[in-house]
Amino acid sequence: MSHRAPGHPRRVAAILFAAIWLPLLAAGCVWLAPTAVPEPQPPATLRPLPPATPSLPATPTRRAPTPTPTAPPAEATPSVNPTSAAAQERTPPPTADPLAALEDGVTLTFWHPLDPEGAAGKALDALLAEFEQIHPEVRVEATAYGSESLLHREILLGVAEGRWPDLALAAPSAVADYVRRGVVEPLDPYLRDPSLAPSQAAWGDLFDGVRQGGRFPPEGGGRYLWPYAQHAVGLWYNLDLLRAAGYTRPPATWEEFEAMSRAVAEHTEAEGYGYVPTGRLAAAWLVSGGEALLTGDWRRAALAEAGGTEALALVARLAAGGAARPYTTAAEALADFAQGRVALLSGSTGDLQELRRAIGAAGNGIDAWGQVPLPRRAGSEAATALSYGDGLCILRSDETRQLAGWLLIRFLTDPRQAAQWARMGYLPLSASAGGLLADHFARSPVARQQFLEIAPYTLPEPGMQAWPEVEDYLLEALLASTSGVAGPEEALAKAAALADQALSH
């Protein structure tokens, strides 16, 4: 597998992978050593952990070689959009052995937004090298761009020049753009083909919210993306501060959340609730109220429903009463939480490792903390957490490279590899993957809590090109409500009207 990073070409030979990787596996090494900062077992009542199978050692890292532009595919931008019904029904080549098409060898170009020197970038690099060991007929040329924005720019440039990659790990809103340009292949034919479909543990065992991701209703409802690098918006809590205010567990409902935030502000020197105002956070609060963000066909916004209005009103009341504090950056908010200055803090599941380090560095003895979903609206059966993140998609090339791309997706999302990936701070997306993380959860009870209480109850952000713009309108509504410039109902009605305009384009 060659991994490229702009401007510094390097190649790691397969023999180096074998020399480093296989002995480490044999020794049973674990990729991430336990941190020196202990995490408490979360006090919330947890659902039983899915039956665990013995945990596999995490994939050892290897230094990622650096990218140069990948070779262009043989096909130029197609004039026919593959999102048509005929394209969605198209199946892989009808051969007795579908993999026979790979016998002569194929080079697969794979672009992704990860930092090649970061833990996740090295983890992906190691998984790609393992894939090449299993499929020696496929050579993967991986290009790491270091950010979603740079990756998106390069893919758009590649589409204009007819040289896009064979496979990409990209944001759903970006993939929606590529789908509309006619350069993304649907995954449905591969999922339906008995000879190519993933295992039941890999596909059928995915949590419901994950299975909802990757579909694009405006493009016929086809599945063009497999959610992979996923996080969710949750609520960090400091149980020490909640106990000082008279509570023994984190809030489960909006009513409990408001009462606890006010009690902490009244009886301690800490902030009750902290948050970084973003459109994503506003969307997460709407989702926690049981509201859909868009209509079923994604043609209209559903932001101004009763649950959304009540959610913003809740945050606005806390801000007006001095029980909530907005932060400028996530780093500032996490630092205050680590110092014991805020009891409840909205934040990403992906912040766990950073927060754990910050608590250790603070040295102020926070003994009991964890993360749960944002509280639910009264009457809701269960909490719902807004999930987001990148997914894997196959871009249009020839049938051989498309088949090789599907084999790589199938490999990366198999429970064993998915469990190794989750060790990098991503949510496990199935019970099967979580069942292989017993050793990881033993070291990190909060990661186990995220898996049990958040991962199974997620709802994905709409994967559409206009969604980032819609989030801007939601941010405006949140800021207007919490500052008193407009009431929540008025603010959300304005956001919905602007979102409808964006969705109509």
Image (cartoon, rainbow, N blue to C red):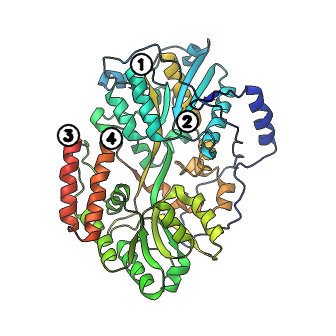
Q: Secondary structure at mark 3?
A: loop
Q: Amino acid at mark 3?
A: Ser
Q: Amino acid at mark 4?
A: Met
At which x and y percent is residue 500? 20, 47
Mark 4 or 2: in front is 4
Query: Distance of mark 4 from mark 3, alpha carbons?
Result: 12 Å
Q: Amino acid at mark 1?
A: Gly
Q: Secondary structure at mark 1?
A: loop
Residue at the spot of label 4: 464
At which x and y percent is residue 324? 38, 74
Residue at the spot of label 2: 199
Disc nearer the start of the sequence (4/2): 2
Query: Distance of mark 4 from mark 2, alpha carbons?
Result: 28 Å
Mark 4 or 1: in front is 1
Residue at the spot of label 1: 162
At which x and y percent is residue 419? 61, 46
Q: In this picture, is 34 found above or below 367?
A: above
Q: Residue furthest top?
A: 104
Quick one: 35 or 118, which is closer to the camera?
Answer: 118
Mark 1 is surrounded, within 10 Å at the Cα level, by few (under 14), some (14 to 19) or many (20 or more) other residues, namely some
